[in-house]
Amino acid sequence: MHWASEVSCLLPFTPDSSLSTGLHLLAALGDGPPHLFEVDTGSVGILVPRQRLGPNYQDFDPSLDTKVQLVSSGDVYWGQWVKVPVILGVPASWDGTGDYPSAEIEVFAADQPADFDGGLLGVGFAIGGLADGGPARNPFLHLTYQGEKLHCGYIIGAQGLELGLTSLNTVGFAFIELQRNDADTDWLQPMASLGLTDGFSIDLPLLIDTGLDQMLLWLDVADRPPALANYTQFPPGIAVTIAAPPPPSTPVLQYSFTTGDARDPMAPSVVEWRDGHGVNTGRNVLAGADYLYDAAAGSIGFRIPPSN
């Protein structure tokens, strides 16, 4: 493996972060103060209220607004892509000093809804639709730190994230090689095998989505197991197993849970049907494995963290 740099930066999530409430990080954009963002591998691009960019970015023409729509929630935002400096992991009382990972990229400055004051660091890939700003707008792939351009990839665990992949921080990971899309503009999501209690099994594209505490199964009604096809959400007591890549390959990621088991940290809050084709794990998979994305090599990886 060739590493563009051996420099990386470890950033802990904010104290209010958890697998149930979301994984959060403070960042300063434009000339604005630090703002709280959720790290979201289920979208691509930074979504930020325009007023959080500071006074130098408030002169704009609302008639030029375009739309961003998140896939899982369906939430719609109107605004414009604006190129700004992005500084990640700053403290809440940041005074503008110190060395932090930074990039200058386009972010989506949301003007509507007017009361929106949240924030997303969309760092996924192959999302598609209006929630995918493309690799050029993924903040984690364009970072400079300590005077060096970081290798364009990252590691996300339950407690924090590491920006920039190196020969040291990738030790212990097993990797799944990704394929390019037809337009050669991005990587495709890998395939995984989904198995359920009654012997039902299907291979689907796999999305690790840190923006959700639930699991979404995108399956047309005709493809769903007859015993469960009419449920919007799975009832309790359904055993779910996911293996990636699918058999006969040796799985790099393999985990299972039973719906409704509140004692299992890897179990999502709910498992819900959606029409389509794919499986969105949600973020609870991070209770059992660290997740890696290498945009340069075209791979994702998983590593079982050491027990405390």
Image (cartoon, rainbow, N blue to C red):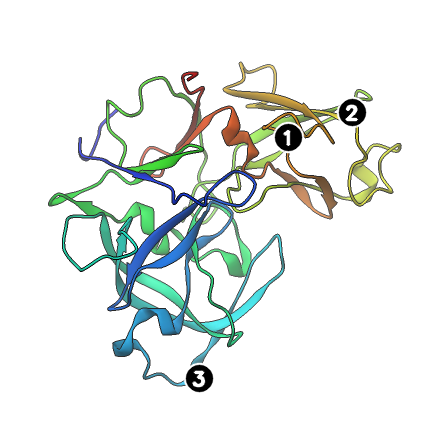
User: Is disc 2 placed on a helix, strand or loop?
Assistant: loop
Residue 56 vs residue 103, the one in the foreground: 56
Between tags 2 and 1, which lies in front?
1
Picture disc at residue 267:
1
Residue type marked 1: Ala
Residue type marked 2: Phe
Distance Cα–Cα, label 1 vs label 3: 43 Å
Residue type marked 3: Pro
Extreme residue toward the left, this view:
147
The part of the image, by quadrant, that contains residue 64 is bottom left
The mark nearer the N terminus, 1 or 3, is 3
Residue that carries the numbered disc 2 in the rendered image: 200
Circle 3 Cα neighbour tier, 10 Å, few/some/many (<14 / 14–19 / ≥20)? few
Q: Say if 228 sits above or below 103 in the image.
A: above
Residue that carries the numbered disc 3 in the rendered image: 62
Q: Residue at x 52, y 49 (%)?
A: 127
The mark nearer the N terminus, 2 or 3, is 3
